[in-house]
Image (cartoon, rainbow, N blue to C red):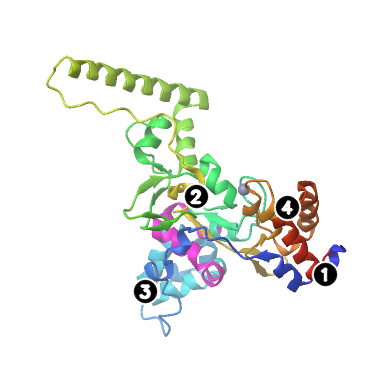
Amino acid sequence: MDQTSMSTAQREALTYPHIEANTLDDQGLARRCPLDNGRHEGTPAFHLGDLDKLPLELLSKTLVQTDLRSLTDLRRVNRRAMEVVDSIMQYQVIVAHAPDSLRGILAIGTGQWITCQKLYDQLCTADCDHCGAFGGYLYLGTCKRVCFFCFSQVPDYLPLPLSDALQRFGLGRRIPKSVPRLRSIPGCYTRDETVLRTRLTLVDSESARQAGIALHGSVSAMEQHASEMASKRRRAYAAKRELKAEGALIPTPRRPRPTKAYDEREADPRRFLAVVRAPWLDLRTRSLEWGFHCLGCLYMDDPWQWAAKFTAETFQSHFEECGKMMEMMGDSPLRRQYVGWLEYMGLL
Ligand SMILES: [Zn+2]
Ligand SMILES: [Zn+2]
């Protein structure tokens, strides 16, 4: 078919907007974490002290580089502070077009590690930070644009329990302040609808890894240290078990944790509790793009093709590609059904 001739209506009939991924934005964030923007209108009753002496433009430039937790705290100080924060262009865009990304950050407590500018920049980025495909989501541990495949499969996006991170990256007894901590909110996560009833405290895996590398000087030194410590724990465990078997009056020893992180990938709720769907703000056209999925991709043999998201721009070339892949797959009742649909739409 002539690719330029696909109309918006045809494209909409061949795609669907989103999958029920049960990410953080599906947990009723508007109710749990209301942003009170627009509520406190009127003349400011108080001033901002010395900050008021700065011109508003300069103040905005400084505040946009402030972390979102401090910025939100500042907003609560008084009406004047609220007016100043609300005048930051980037803040306005976030609240108007992607409020759940801000609510999500505040809900899981990663605001102190993410600046207003960083969140805005990620909204203006289309591509997944890891694979470069269109990313319809933000991972809020460190605020990165991600696609479904990457946030559910790549090790960097699996937040870890504190003790796991300490052991795996040889961090000693304490997680450094530079490593973002996340507190999950109870809810229903993953496509399997796994219910998390308690609040988990986790850390961003990649930041913890980087802290370990910085502490030990290199990846190999860090890995060597972690492996030596793991052997030490295993030896201590074996020795205690032996003593216990000989009848020593000691508590039953606890088996050391496995050195490899426990990871259920797309079925692991920890991979979904810091992720929100987020639109891409295309600065060229000043339009919002949430992305969508291709119906044809549902008929592919590739186990992950269904998760790919496209934009109006990338879908044109994908549609052709998808058709070629389908031809190679041969005949099947499902495929015939889809081809019949394409004929009906006048696209074959
Ligand atoms: Zn990706
Ligand atoms: Zn497709």
Q: CA distance from mark 2 to mark 4?
A: 44 Å
- Mark 2 or mark 1, which has the lower sequence index? 2
- Mark 3 or mark 1, which has the lower sequence index? 3
In the image, the segment drawn in magenta is 91-117
- Residue 217 lies left or right of residue 16; in this view the side is left
- Mark 4 or mark 1, which has the lower sequence index? 4
Q: Mark 4: give few (<14), some (14-19) or many (20+) Cα within 10 Å.
A: few
Residue that mark 1 sits on: 346
Residue 192 x %, y %:
47, 54
Residue that mark 2 sits on: 142
Q: Which mark is residue 78?
A: 3
For discs 2 and 3, the disc positioned in front in the rendered view: 2
Q: Amino acid at mark 2?
A: Thr
Q: CA distance from mark 2 to mark 1?
A: 45 Å
Residue that mark 4 sits on: 332
Residue 108 x %, y %:
40, 56
- Residue 28 lies left or right of residue 339; in this view the side is left
Instruction: Assign the N terminus to one quadrant of the image.
Output: bottom right
**Relative to 139, residue 83 above or below:** below
Seen at 79% across and 55% down, the residue is 323
For discs 3 and 4, the disc positioned in front in the rendered view: 4
Q: Does residue 285 appear in this view?
A: no
For discs 2 and 4, the disc positioned in front in the rendered view: 4
Given residues 28 and 60, the one toward you in this image is 28
Give the residue furthest to the bottom. 42
Give the residue furthest to the right. 2
Q: Mark 3: give few (<14), some (14-19) or many (20+) Cα within 10 Å.
A: some
